[in-house]
Amino acid sequence: MITVALAKGRLAQKATEILEKCGLKLDELKIETRKLVLYDNSGQFKFVFVKPSDVPTYVERGVADFGVVGKDTLLEADRDIYEMLDLKFGKCRMCVCGYPDSLTNAGGILKVGTKYDKITKEYFGAKGKTIDVIKLHGSIELAPIIGLADVIVDIVESGKTLEANGLQVLEEVCSCSARLVVNRVSLKTKKGLLELLEKIKENI
Ligand code: PRP
């Protein structure tokens, strides 16, 4: 049995499409359900659907042999797992965003709203800039609008959320996409896993 942790939402659909191209039959995954554990038709693969930020934890602890998660989540989690493949979908950019003059106009210590406090601290730390990180969990774009933060660090995909709220990209931190991450022990001990990973590589 091989267990796969998938991030609920944007990335799960694309990940299952690749697995189908590799020959897995995933009928149960196509049915609208609230079940959190699902199986492929053969019963050899188990799928768990978890919050994106929990995927690295499941894989590091070995309750999932591999998982699919965004590079943004991976950088933020900083776990002992093997990032094996760039799956090339779910592409987006991690950016510093705000009003055109937000960086220059900020008086004193720059206030930065973000879900990604580790990435944010590292980015500004590397520039030698002291900042005040304001940890948020969603609707990050609201922070500069309402005056909670000077700028935000967030993912930008289409740019529509920024545009709709009168904000823009000020600096790019890094580019992100979906990554396949593997538990280090599973990689050495599960033969079927290596075979599947080879097939996935051919189907990206
Ligand atoms: C993400 C991100 C931006 C938006 C960017 O939010 O935090 O708000 O997507 O996408 P866009 O450039 O295509 O507009 P998400 O939808 O994950 O919701 P959130 O507000 O809960 O973070």
Image (cartoon, rainbow, N blue to C red):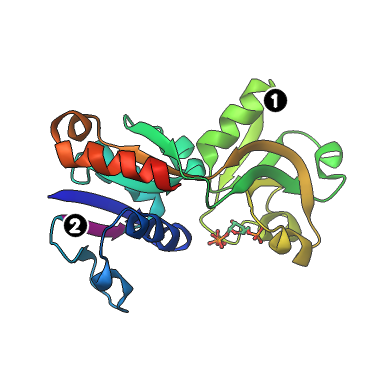
Q: Residue at x 22, y 41 (%)?
A: 193
153 sits to left or right of 39: right
Q: Counting residues from the N terminus, which is met first, the one under dot 2 or under dot 1?
A: 2
**Mark number displayed over residue 46:** 2
Q: Position of residue 75 (x, y in %)?
A: 48, 36
Q: Write down which quadrant ligand 1 falls in.
A: bottom right
The mark found on residue 129 in the picture is 1
Q: Is mark 1 within 8 Å of ligand 1?
A: no
Asked if residue 133 lies left or right of residue 36, the reply is right
Asked whether residue 57 is in view, the answer is: no
Q: Amino acid at mark 2?
A: Lys
**Residue at 53% from the left image edge and 52% from the top image edge:** 90
Residue 84 lies in what quarter of the image?
Answer: top left
- Please, is residue 122 above or below residue 146 in the view? above
Magenta: main secondary structure equals strand
Per the image, label 2 sits on a secondary structure element best described as strand
The percent position of residue 157, horizontal first and vertical second, equals 64, 55
Q: Looking at the image, which residue is at 24% across and 36% down? A: 194
Q: Amino acid at mark 1?
A: Lys
Question: Is the residue marked by circle 1 packed among few (<14), some (14-19), or many (20+) residues within 10 Å?
Answer: few
Left or right: 68, with 126 as reference point: left
x and y, in percent, of residue 162 in the image:
73, 59
Residues in magenta, as a range:
45-49
Magenta span includes 68: no
Q: Is the residue 40 above or below the residue 144 in the image?
A: below
